[in-house]
Image (cartoon, grey):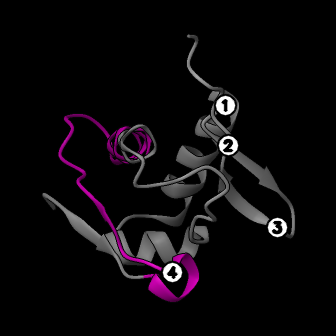
Amino acid sequence: MADSWVNSAEILGSDLHLELTRAGSRRTALMAALREAIRDGRLAPDTRLPPYRSLAADLGIARNTVADAYAELVAEGWLTARQGSGTRVAPRPAPPP
């Protein structure tokens, strides 16, 4: 799958285009695509991401793959997660002057 649309517009308020073209595992490709979307500003701080099952179904990958990618991005500081609140894009520090 070269690219996929996340069709969770009702949850996000907009469609998010993710390209899973990076070589390696689907988890690695998903993490790279999410990092790029955050860096590019397509995913603003505090944007709620779709639940694991929704994103996995939209991308045609396993739910655990999405869960593992989210967990690693939380550990790296790209995302925040709170039980019952979902997973959100973490606030980014302002660049130094």
Q: Earlier in the sequence, mark 3 or mark 4?
A: 4
Query: Residue tagged by mark 2?
Result: 90
As drawn, 88 above or below 63: above
Give me the C-alpha separation between circle 4 and circle 2. 18 Å
| Quarter of image, res 67 | bottom right
Q: Amino acid at mark 4?
A: Gly
Q: Earlier in the sequence, mark 4 or mark 2?
A: 4
73 relative to 65 in the view: left or right? right
Query: Callout 3: 10 Å neighbours few (<14), some, many (20+)?
Result: few
Q: Amino acid at mark 1?
A: Gly
58 relative to 85 in the view: left or right? left
**Which mark, by number, is residue 77?**
1
Q: Earlier in the sequence, mark 2 or mark 3?
A: 3
Residue 69, position in %: x, y?
Answer: 53, 45
Give me the C-alpha separation between circle 2 and circle 1. 7 Å
Q: Are marks 1 and 3 in contact (CB under 8 Å)?
A: no
